[in-house]
Image (cartoon, grey):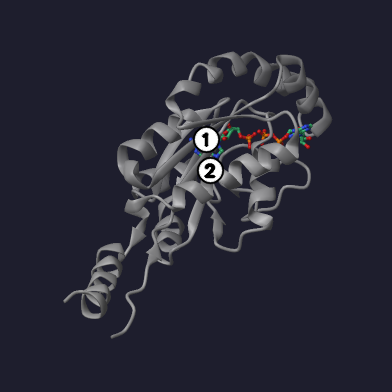
Amino acid sequence: MEKSEIKNRGVMLVISSPSGAGKSTLTKLLMHDDDNITLSISATTRQARPGEVEGKDYFFLNHDEFRAKIDNDEMLEWASVFGNLYGTPKEPVYKALDEGKDVLFDIDWQGTQQLHAKAQKDLVRVFILPPTASALEQRLHARAQDSLDVINSRMKGASRELEHWAEYDYIVINDDLKISEQKLKAILYAEKQKRNRQQGLVEFVRDMQGELRLKFED
Ligand code: ADP
Ligand code: 5GP
């Protein structure tokens, strides 16, 4: 008798936070050590920051191009954030999940709510908090990618973004980066052991029971 195989169903792992709390940094660390994770590359109408690469950090679109994608139902979710449109192209997400990959989303609370409505059973939501308000401000300055005006508008928006922390399954306070990385890895690892994410368990246990009965029952 051939042993029944167990396959893991991919997790849709959302990481949200106020801008500057450390999402992108943690996302990169998570992906570095795990070949099975695919990052969902969002589309946006905002300008590329210095060093950002088309198709790697974002798909940079103009307003009309973005609207056309919404109209053609090509977006899994989309939202207006800080006056720009951001959205998740649908097709690559479904392709990755079909291949058994875990998909990581760096999206805001509005997008998370939309994914929750569409794909609750596959979704794991993590909210990253900065250790303090001043650490958040310092990190935005340290990143040195935004103008002072943009940094100030992000700090103004942070309090409103924080209102949504309780809509998430897990909260990670990103003080020590290494510890936050370990916490995120632990969350993903534990979520993958959930019964509903292990396909083939019924057959696996049934086969084992068959073997036990054959060998040990009178
Ligand atoms: P986000 O993607 O949430 O906007 P980033 O990942 O770009 O934030 O992080 C903002 C800045 O803070 C970056 O310069 C990053 O190196 C730094 N940073 C991230 N996490 C930590 C941490 N735990 N301690 C100190 N600096 C951090
Ligand atoms: P940034 O401009 O700093 O790259 O991103 C600003 C905010 O937009 C962040 O909170 C980020 O999570 C969010 N964001 C990025 N991509 C998407 C997306 O595809 N959908 C939604 N809803 N938010 C996104």
On screen, residue 119 above or below 198? above
- Which residue, given by chain and number where applicable, does mark 2 sit on? 187
Q: Is residue 95 left or right of residue 32?
A: left
Q: Is residue 142 left or right of residue 3?
A: right
Between residue 213 and residue 194, name the one nearer to us. Answer: 213
Q: What residue is rendered at 68% in x and 24% in y?
A: 130
- Which residue, given by chain and number where applicable, does mark 1 sit on? 126
Quadrant position of residue 117: top left
Rendered-image quadrant of the C terminus? bottom left
Q: Ligand 2, what quadrant? A: top right
Q: Is residue 61 left or right of residue 93?
A: right
Residue 39 coordinates in the image, percent (x, y): 56, 53
Residue 28 coordinates in the image, percent (x, y): 68, 49
- The kind of residue on which mark 1 rests is Val
Mark number for residue 186? none
Q: Earlier in the sequence, mark 1 or mark 2?
A: 1
- The kind of residue on which mark 2 rests is Ile
Tell us which disc is closer to us: 1 or 2. Answer: 2
